[in-house]
């Protein structure tokens, strides 16, 4: 059985690593010269919008999925006559546009930030008057890892933000003084069965995820997050893994954004859950029984940003699992991650902090 994956980044690579023990084969589509998944499986080196290459992918694969959401939904939709596409293109389309995403959350009764769509300079003035300062101006599309966004604190910031971002459709929203950030990862199979992983606590700096620890949060917070991810999956008759990121403020969940795919905050599930998010995504899209999402310990996952530290130094740490994505070093780039699974949350936190300190990552627990 061959799985086609649009995008051959680290997420696709980890899907292949999870799929080979199940006897699966993989074929990727990616225009990059040497993407991370190319070390594991053949890659059609064409643009994501190349109809002929997509048709070839569909013809050679039982199912086509994605490893990043900014693919052409129109091109994917055309393939539906040829093969199965999971997750559903409608969910990918909603996640591509911050305005559709906000409307979806509101429709499903999931609290989100106060926001306004901004298409002109006048609309920006109006949005700032309505929502107030401070706020965040974000591109509606193609934003990731804090790119395409700008925090506005004083009226003087408007002009600079407009000059930086004003060429494309935008969204302005309140800056949430959150207590912390969490994400929930769910998986839904073809017959509608749903499993949800325990909540992740995420620490970002400079818009990039640095650290995740899981399981996290009270039973109540986990229940709320589970209800929200279930509602989104049921709405789309979703198949595969779906992630929602939230701000937590005074015990309330405020949805920030969703990702129709496996997620960086779920990398700990490779060693820290009975079934990883990558394997469960494959199980779901291939109509295989879902695996348990139960945590097998207390996991801490640290992203390796820019370059991989000295391998021997990292591996000297007892029980540390290293994942090197095979990417060229570049400042601000996610090039790998490492995970520790410990018998207690306290021990996990102490050891994860030590890794962060050694990496001089400049982040710590609140
Ligand atoms: P995003 O690309 O929307 O996920 O934003 C990346 C990170 O920037 C988030 O995880 C937050 O740490 C921060 N951020 C984005 N939007 C807001 C907001 N409205 N209020 C506070 N922090 C935000």
Image (spheres, rainbow, N blue to C red):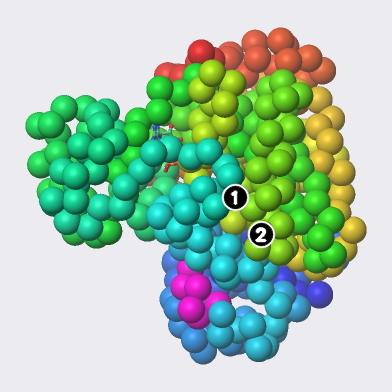
Q: Is residue 264 above or below residue 132?
A: below
Number of marks in picture = 2
- Residue 48 can be seen in this image: no
Residue shown at the point (78%, 14%) measured from the top left: 344
Q: In this rendering, is residue 167 above or below 336?
A: below
Horizontal and vertical percent position of residue 303: 54, 34
**SS at badge 2:** helix
Indicate whether 105 appears above or below 234.
above
Q: Residue at x 59, y 21 (%)?
A: 251
* Residue 310, position as x, y percentages in the image: 53, 29
Residue drawn at the location 60% of the way across and 27% of the way down: 201
Determine the secondary structure under disc 1.
loop
- Magenta-highlighted stretch: main secondary structure? helix
Residue at (46% x, 30% y) in the render: 204
Relative image position of residue 59 (x, y in whole percent):
67, 87
- Write down the quadrant of residue 353 in the picture: top right
């Amino acid at each position: 059985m061959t799985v086609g994956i649009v995008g051959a980044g680290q997420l696709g690579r980890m899907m292949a690593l999870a799929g080979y023990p199940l006897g699966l084969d993989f074929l990727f589509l990616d225009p990059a010269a040497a993407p991370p998944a190319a070390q594991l499986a053949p890659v059609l080196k064409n643009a994501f919008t190349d109809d002929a290459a997509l048709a070839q992918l569909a013809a050679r694969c039982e199912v086509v999925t994605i490893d990043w959401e900014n693919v052409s939904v129109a091109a994917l939709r055309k393939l539906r006559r040829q093969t199965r596409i999971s997750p559903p293109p409608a969910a990918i389309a909603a996640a591509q546009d911050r305005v559709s995403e906000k409307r979806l959350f509101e429709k499903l009764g999931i609290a989100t930030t106060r926001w306004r769509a901004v298409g002109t300079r006048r609309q920006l003035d109006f949005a700032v008057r309505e929502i107030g300062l401070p706020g965040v101006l974000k591109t509606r599309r193609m934003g990731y890892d804090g790119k395409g966004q700008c925090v506005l604190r004083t009226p003087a910031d408007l002009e600079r933000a407009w000059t930086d971002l004003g060429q494309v459709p935008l969204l302005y929203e309140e800056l949430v003084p959150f207590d912390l950030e969490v994400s929930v990862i769910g998986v839904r199979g073809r017959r509608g069965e749903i499993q949800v992983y325990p909540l992740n606590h995420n620490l970002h700096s400079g818009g990039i995820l640095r650290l995740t620890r899981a399981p996290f949060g009270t039973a109540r917070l986990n229940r709320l997050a589970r209800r929200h991810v279930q509602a989104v999956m049921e709405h789309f008759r979703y198949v595969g893994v779906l992630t929602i990121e939230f701000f937590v403020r005074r015990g309330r969940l405020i949805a920030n954004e969703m990702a129709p795919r496996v997620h960086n905050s779920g990398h700990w599930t490779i060693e820290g859950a009975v079934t990883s998010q990558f394997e469960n995504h494959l199980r779901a899209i291939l109509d295989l029984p879902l695996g348990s999402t139960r945590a097998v310990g207390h996991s801490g996952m640290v992203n390796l940003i820019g370059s991989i530290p000295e391998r021997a130094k990292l591996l000297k740490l007892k029980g540390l699992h290293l994942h090197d994505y095979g990417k060229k070093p570049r400042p601000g780039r996610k090039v790998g991650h490492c995970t520790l699974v410990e018998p207690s949350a306290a021990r996990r936190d102490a050891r994860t902090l030590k890794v962060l300190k050694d990496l001089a990552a400049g982040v710590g627990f609140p």
